[in-house]
Image: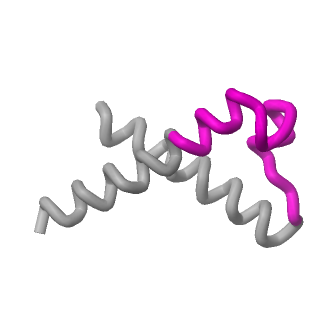
Amino acid sequence: MLTWIALILIIIGAINWGLLGLFKFDLIAKLFRGQGSLVSRIIYTLVGFSGIYTLIMLILRR
């Protein structure tokens, strides 16, 4: 279950980075009233932890 949550968060992060790169549009910041809002910072942090978790899972599976 944790792996699925991590993958969903990584997908959200990837879509957000794609929007930033193509259109300079931060969807998370727009939805939650800016990059500095508590909710936005929590989401960014969870996406980062999900990336680290997934990287560890990838390394351990080899």
- Figure quadrant of residue 59: bottom left
Residue 14, x across and y down, in percent: 60, 59
Q: Nearer the viewer, residue 40 or 58?
A: 40
Residue 11 appears left or right of 18: left
Residue 12, x across and y down, in percent: 60, 47
Numbered label tally? 0
Residue 29, x across and y down, in percent: 80, 42
Query: Colour scheme in the image?
Result: one colour
- Figure quadrant of residue 34: top right
Which image quarter holds the N terminus?
A: top left
Say which residue appears at 82% left-offset and 71% top-offset: 22
Q: Is residue 9 one of those drawn in magenta? A: no
The range drawn in magenta is: 24-45
Say which residue appears at 11% left-offset and 69% top-offset: 62
Residue 3 appears left or right of 43: left
Residue 26 appears left or right of 43: right
Residue 50 vertical placement versus 55 (above, below): above
